Image (cartoon, grey):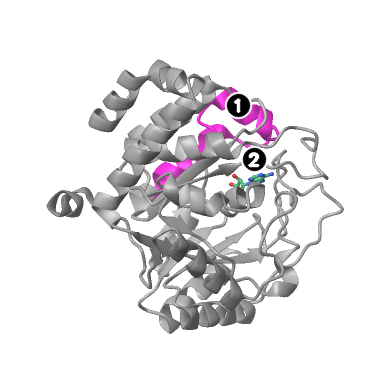
Amino acid sequence: MKELVDKLSEKHSLSESEYAALIRGRALDITAELAGLAVQTRRAIYGNDVFTRGLIEISSICKNNCLYCGIRKDNHNANRYRLTEDDILSCAAEGYRLGFRTFVLQGGDDPFFTDPVLCGIVYKLKENHSDCAVTLSMGERSRESYKQLFDAGADRYLLRHETADPEHYARLHPKEMSFANRMQCLYDLRDIGYQVGCGFMVGSPFQTPETLAKDLKFIEEFKPDMCGIGPFIPHHDTAFRDMPAGTVEETLYLLSIIRLIHPPVLLPATTALGTIDPNGREKGIQAGANVVMPNLSPVEVRGKYELYDNKICTGEESAQCRQCLDTRMRAIGYRLVVDRGDIKRQTEVNSNV
Ligand code: SAH
């Protein structure tokens, strides 16, 4: 194991079977060693800065039926809502006052948000806050649509690949959803010029060390600007309700590995990690993450964007969320910065180290 860790930290690359061995061999000593290396690597690039993104959950209406997700189309118990353009712009204005310089619009794949509608919102956000980045996380769309949104001003796009193993993908999604299309979307987004984020759930049903090894190899090769990983948490109205949740330990271990695979990657300590452990986000930062994404959605709708059970921060105002995270980060020796939080390119990284 020690040799695998050394090789990973020096070469930023392992073979798929070595990644699988590293995942199978997870133990306390190796976890601590990886976290130490990951923090050192991150610190050389980003110091003790933690970037924030203001997350605006714009719709819980979805045309898709991902088997794990609480807002899947066929969940007739889900509470559905859709924010108006005015709602979204005022959430962003409030976020701006609080020091956010990136807004992430995330939602179900809601057909209401056609290209003209979404482009109009992106355009106005950039007009109101020209010093901010706009990130979209609105699922699979056509290349043409991604291009129009980019031209309207969107800077970044998050689309978790969910799993890099096609058979595993097919067990997590209904047959009308395609692994090949999701991957193609990521390549299209990159090609158009977005900063692109992929990612997956840790401990999703049917995940194995071998499927995870494929995720890691994909990350090594694709070199995403951002990578969102968080534990799978079952939702009571889905077929996966009785499946075990992913663990904090495995999530932290993978965060450290991903930091070492791709040192400058923007890596969030996710809300799902904060949901399964009250100090999950702090632990995520201490394992190598460098981003947090507190919620800016209106408090009335927060409980309705229920991807999984027991999601945290559904009752607090945006200002409270920002304040709470600020205190949490200070307590572990980090600071939330008022910054767009773009990825540092390798050339900048080299000149810093
Ligand atoms: N419609 C968009 C946004 C999806 S929600 C899209 O398709 O990209 C954002 C992410 O939440 C998903 O990509 C998935 O990885 C995660 N998620 C969904 N259900 C979850 C669950 N039960 N537990 C943990 N994460 C979940």
**Furthest residue in direction left, as rendered:** 351
Question: Where is residue 97 shown, x and y percent of the image?
Answer: 48, 83
Q: In the rendered structure, find residue 232 and report the number of the disc placed on it.
A: 2
* CB-based contact (under 8 Å), mark 1 and mark 2: yes
Residue 261 screen position, x and y as percent: 33, 35
Task: Name which residue type carries label 1.
Answer: Gln
- Is residue 164 covered in magenta? yes
- Name which of mark 1 and mark 2 comes first in the sequence: 1
What residue does disc 1 label?
Answer: 207
Q: Amino acid at mark 2?
A: Phe
Instruction: Classify mark 2 as within 8 Å of ligand 1 or not, answering yes or no.
Output: yes
How far is the residue under mark 1 from the one under mark 2?
10 Å
In the depicted structure, whether residue 211 falls above or below residue 204: above
Position of the N terminus by quadrant: top left
The stretch in magenta equals 161-189
Element under disc 2 = loop
Residue 308 horizontal/vertical position (percent): 72, 49
Query: Regarding mark 1 in the picture, which secondary structure is present there?
Result: loop
Query: Which of 175 and 215 lies nearest the eye of the viewer?
Result: 215
Indicate the quadrant where residue 61 lies: bottom right
Most common SS among magenta residues: helix
Left or right, residue 262 beside residue 227: left
Compared across the picture, whether 133 is left or right of 9 comes to right
Please say whether residue 194 is one of the residues in the magenta stretch: no
Ligand 1 within 8 Å, label 1 CB: no
Foreground residue, 16 or 1? Answer: 1
Residue 271 visible (yes or no): yes
Visible in this render: residue 161? Answer: no
Up-down relation of residue 153 to residue 311 (above or below): below
Q: Is residue 169 left or right of residue 103?
A: right
Residue 111 x, y percent position in the rendering: 67, 59
